[in-house]
Amino acid sequence: MAHIKENILHIQQEIEGLCNRIGKDPREIHLIAVTKTVDADKINEAIDNGIVNIGENKVQEIMNKFEQVDHVNWHMIGHLQTNKVKYIVDKVQMIHSVDRIHLAEEINKRAKQINRCIDILIQVNIAQEETKFGLDEKDIYDFIEQLEGLQHIHVKGLMTIAPYDDVPDRVRIHFKRMKQLFDEIHNKNIKGVEMHYLSMGMTNDFKVAIEEGANMIRIGTGIFGERNYTEK
Ligand SMILES: *Cc1c(COP(=O)(O)O)cnc(C)c1O
């Protein structure tokens, strides 16, 4: 039995307490409830309890649940194959996992066909883990340059998945580096590139992420409980 309502309240209280401690406005922190493997009824229960953003990491899950879920902003947070963009381009508010120019071009093309613009985040593999998707930080500026002219995508910030560590403080260094990059890109005032959202922090490490500057956190387990799930 999942205690979705209590869990959401608990996370919100933790965000509030932390923000008060570090002098931030808790309203600046956007909470994304990660709903992978969670059925539509439970997602709707979360929405009834104040959730306005949900995150999925698989195209198929978005397609399966889209019709059954109440009005909410959908975020694609997982690795996205180029040939599957067409299935979600009309459904998602934001794509967090853009890490290849071909993918960006496909999103732009499909968004243009339906006459809309899609917000995207650039995914960075900040700890240079072989098993993770995302750009190397050294490639970010080349990547941003290549996005110029893609008028149906709006770059809104950066996203990363930190390495898992039982001691979240040990990944602080990666969050810190992400914030530096975020500020650096922001200060360059690149046309068409906004640094508005820094999406980092999950159940295990969201407090450290917020302390280091995250304003969008992605929480699954902390809201819906432990789930069996594989990345593939
Ligand atoms: C599953 C997932 C999360 C949430 O992870 P929890 O540890 O369950 O909070 C966040 N981001 C991405 C990209 C995920 O795949």
Image (tube, rainbow, N blue to C red):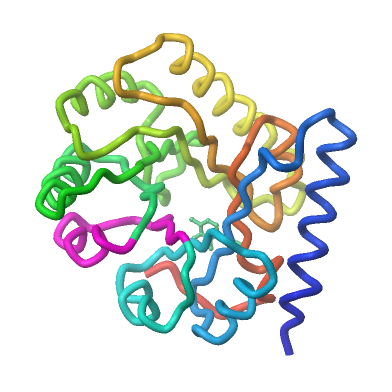
In magenta segment, residue 84: yes
Figure quadrant of residue 11: bottom right
Q: Residue furthest bottom?
A: 1
Figure quadrant of residue 20: top right
Q: Nearer the viewer, residue 98 or 129?
A: 98
Side (left or right) of 13 relative to 197: right
Q: Nearer the viewer, residue 163 or 124?
A: 124
Side (left or right) of 230 relative to 151: right
The image position of residue 78, as x and y in percent, is 40, 58
- Residue sitting at x 84%, y 41%: 18
Location of the N terminus (image quadrant): bottom right
Side (left or right) of 117 relative to 109: right
- Residue sitting at x 64%, y 75%: 48
- Residue sitting at x 45%, y 33%: 157
Question: Which of the four quarters of the rendered structure image does ligand 1 lie in?
Answer: bottom right
Residue extent of the magenta highlight: 73-91
Figure quadrant of residue 7: bottom right
Location of the C terminus (image quadrant): bottom left
Residue 181 sits above or below residue 17 on the image: above
Give the number of callouts. Answer: 0
The image position of residue 218, as x and y in percent, is 58, 54
Side (left or right) of 86 relative to 215: left
- Residue sitting at x 31%, y 40%: 99
Residue 214 sits above or below residue 94 on the image: above
In magenta segment, residue 122: no
The image position of residue 84, as x and y in percent, is 19, 63
The image position of residue 194, as x and y in percent, is 41, 25
